[in-house]
Image (spheres, rainbow, N blue to C red):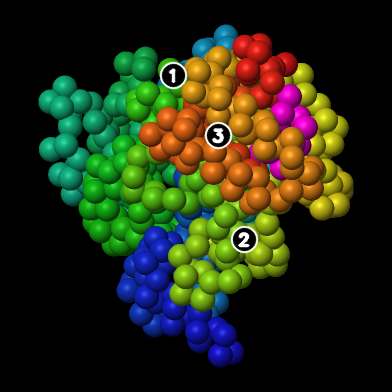
Amino acid sequence: MTTNDDALIAAARVSKAWPFEEARKLLKRYPDGKPGGAPVLFETGYGPSGLPHIGTFQEVLRTTLVRRAYEALTGGAPTRLVAFSDDMDGLRKVPDNVPNKGLLTAHLHEPLSRIPDPFGRFESFAHHNNAMLRDFLDRFGFDYEFVSAADRYNSGAFDEALRGVLNNFDAIMGIMLPTLREERRKTYSPILPVSPTNRQVLQVPVEVVDVAQGLIRFTDTTGEVVEQTIFGGQAKLQWKVDWAMRWVALGVDYEMCGKDLTDSVTQSGKIAQVLGGKRPEGLIYELFLDENGEKISKSKGNGLTIEQWLDYGSEESLGFYLFREPKSAKSLHVGVIPRAVDEYWQFREKLPTQPLEQQLGNPVWHLLRTNGYHGGEGEALPVTYGLLLNLVGVLGANATRAQVWSYLGNYVENADPAAHPALDALVTRALAYNRDFIAPTLIRRKPDANEALALAALDEELAATSEGATAEELQNLVYEIGKDPHYGFAGLRDWFKALYETLLGSAQGPRMGSFIALYGVANTRSLIAEALDGTEAG
């Protein structure tokens, strides 16, 4: 181990960044490493009754952040990440976003892995969604192992763990029954047999007949009393029992989940202990809210998809947004994207100048390590996304990439898209964001008398200023006019607000010196002229 490794481990052991706080739980769990040098196992779960979404991404990303933090904390102790698909679950409801809904309706309550694929591409609906999950995770470069519940149940790999459930049937019922409503207690069973008649996953009481053979007795949908083994995929477990069994069977050491599963964590932890195992360490994170502060619901359709985020912001900005404060509820809507983009680049630019202790608290340090990337940490954007959006807003809904780059030539050295690929990608996204959200809302108001005098003074100053003036020089010029008591502004904030509303059509805006430098002195004078004429700039 090198001196650098020692310094990293020492800093990681005291860092307050949440991935290290989570990783230290695993250090406490295994002070001397996992027995036999086995890798610490991280798990994420996925229910393939629908397509993977932004929640799937955030759980795998956040778990990976903890995994990499643990590796840094231990100097490279072995780890694994399992992406587990609960594809033995019965289909409870037909999703809205699939074709051939009638096909799925005819197979309600059957295991997802045994239902035909409505897309007609795979052997089952679960196989289709599992393939989408793997493509989804591969797209972002996650290092993981895919595990299918159906494969484990059908192959017999879970048989020994299922035998453990039968052995502790009464104890598990003792944990679960007090948590259920009286009506539900009458039909509850930890084991859900698959009907030999219609292949549905049944919610019926069962009686344990023979633990060694896995035999249970239950009443089928036909009214016939059936004795059937639970081994080899002929049954699955009720959710909370299934989660606990999986933890024990796979040896899961860490798994996080949303706040809505808090009770499941508690009950599954008790069941895992009954089965001879131990509940994994984990983080219970807060859920996403929409722009009105309401919980995001797939049925309401008030969420934001990962595709939508990537239409308007970068993958790194999404990771940055998800990194911050996982125990606090987060608004998830398009309005948060521009700030997330700019804050990501602010943190990325400052990373190489920070001492190690501060680097470990920098979200970018963690994000760059998720896929093993350690280079280029000091890269910077020559123009902020916010400033880019202001420029595109002035250019209008029909602005083009070429137009934007022509203006960037006023501000960026070597203004060639090939030389600035990250900025070029944001230009495309800024055009989309402006077209869909900014242009339809921009309204430039006419200045009042005092504001008109100040704008005329600004125009006069700009007339005497060269196109080569720096952003700082232009900013000072704007400041001086705003501070002049002759124009009656209560403070600089009022002056800048007037500039934003009369020139840009927005209540908020950029540093005006930077904007003028980017847009150009002559073009800014044209904006002022249009404002003073009471006309709207196009």
Q: For the residues labelled 3 and 2, say whether their Cβ atoms are less than 8 Å apart.
A: no
Determine which residue is flagged by label 3: 509
For disc 1, the marked residue is: 299
Marks 3 & 1, CB-CB < 8 Å contact:
no
Residue 467, percent from left and from top: 79, 42
Provide the secondary structure element on which disc 3 rests: loop
For badge 3, the amino acid type reads: Gly
The residue singled out by tag 2 in the image is 349
Task: Find the residue positioned furthest to the front.
Answer: 486
- Between label 3 and label 1, give the one nearer the viewer: 3
Residue range corresponding to the magenta coloring? 515-526
Tags 1 and 2 in contact by the CB under 8 Å rule? no
In whole angstroms, how far apart are the C-alphas of marks 3 and 1? 36 Å
Give the mark, 3 or 2, whose residue is nearer the N terminus: 2
**Residue 373 relative to residue 104: left or right:** right
Question: In terms of secondary structure, where does tag 2 sit?
Answer: helix
Q: Camera-side residue: 211 or 389?
A: 389
Q: Quadrant of residue 204?
A: top left
Dividing the picture into quadrants, the one containing residue 274 is: bottom left
Which comes before the other along the chain, label 1 or label 2? 1
Report the predominant secondary structure element of the magenta stretch. Answer: helix
Residue 372 visible in this rendered orientation of the protein: yes
The answer to whether residue 304 is visible is no
Is residue 218 covered in magenta? Answer: no
Quadrant for the C terminus in the image = top right
In the rendered image, the vertical position of residue 78 relative to residue 2, given as above or below: above
Name the residue type under label 1: Ser
